[in-house]
Image (tube, rainbow, N blue to C red):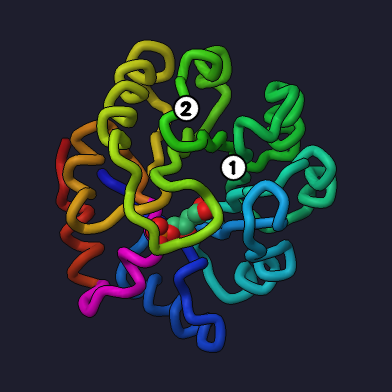
Amino acid sequence: MVRVSASLLAADFICIADDVARMEQAGVDSLHVDFMDGHYVPNLALSPYHVETLASRTELPLEVHLEIANPDQLLDSFKRFPADMIILQWDTCPQPLTSLERVGDWGTRVGIGLLPLTPIEPVVPYLDKLDMLLLLGVQPGFGGQEIIPGTIEWVAGVGDVRQQYAPDLAIGVDGGVKASNAGELVQAGADVLIMGSGLFNVPDIDGLVRSLKRIRR
Ligand code: DX5
Ligand code: ZN
């Protein structure tokens, strides 16, 4: 079944507890927490402090997306961190296996994120070590952008490679995902729809999550 992950970049931070409760009630599967450092992307976003606070308020799994320049430097500080998954950007990991193993060693699930339209071939040797492959539909840094043309075809190509090398691997799409393109993304191979503005800014969030979960490939 399609999984929906709510990207908190689009939440109202004055009323974050209310927004988290709305997402729980709507039946999302996880919360997506973007870390941004002002170097890898031209923006700042959430931090370990936010994850610790969120973990004390919700049972939903917390997926941390590290959109930061040097994740290796921070990984040790995440050891006792209440995140269920840590997603590293492929182009920030000079030694992907070492970084993936460090996270895996302390039992946290691990993902790799790819910038829009990145060729999948160099990542193939690592696919069977991942819990999720995250495909960015926009240049990272900001919510509310339109999905980049060619993303659906890219997801489909990655989906074929996944079938061949790691059929159980979940493919997530992050950035520009909306009700209007969710069906095509799932048909192409997406298992997890990571949604910020396309989820928080609609009038009937419960109805949207219900309909997303009814999409079949
Ligand atoms: C982009 C972030 C996304 C972002 C998605 O850098 O990784 O998680 O919040 O936002 P929307 O769904 O509004 O494109
Ligand atoms: Zn993200």
Q: Is residue 122 shown to the viewer in this render?
A: yes
Position of residue 208 in the picture relative to residue 20 (left or right):
left
Helix, strand or loop at label 1? It is: strand
Q: Is residue 23 above or below residue 99?
A: below
Q: Is residue 210 left or right of residue 128?
A: left
Name the front one of labels 1 and 2.
2
- Left or right: 31, with 75 as reference point: left
Q: Is residue 31 visible?
A: no
User: Which residue is painted at 32% across and 74% down in the image?
Assistant: 201
Q: Position of residue 88 (x, y in %)?
A: 63, 39
For label 1, the residue is 87
Q: Nearer the viewer, residue 69 or 185?
A: 69
Check disc 1 and give the amino acid type.
Answer: Ile
Q: Secondary structure at mark 2?
A: loop
Q: What amino acid does circle 2 point to? A: Thr
Residue bearing mark 2: 118
Dot 1 surroundings within 10 Å: few (below 14), some, or many (20 or more)?
many
The quadrant in which residue 190 appears is: top left
Tell me the quarter of the image containing the C terminus.
top left
> What span is colored magenta in the figure?
194-205
Rendered residue at 59%/46% (across/down): 85
Q: Is residue 146 above or below residue 103?
A: below
Q: Residue at x 33, y 28 (%)?
A: 154
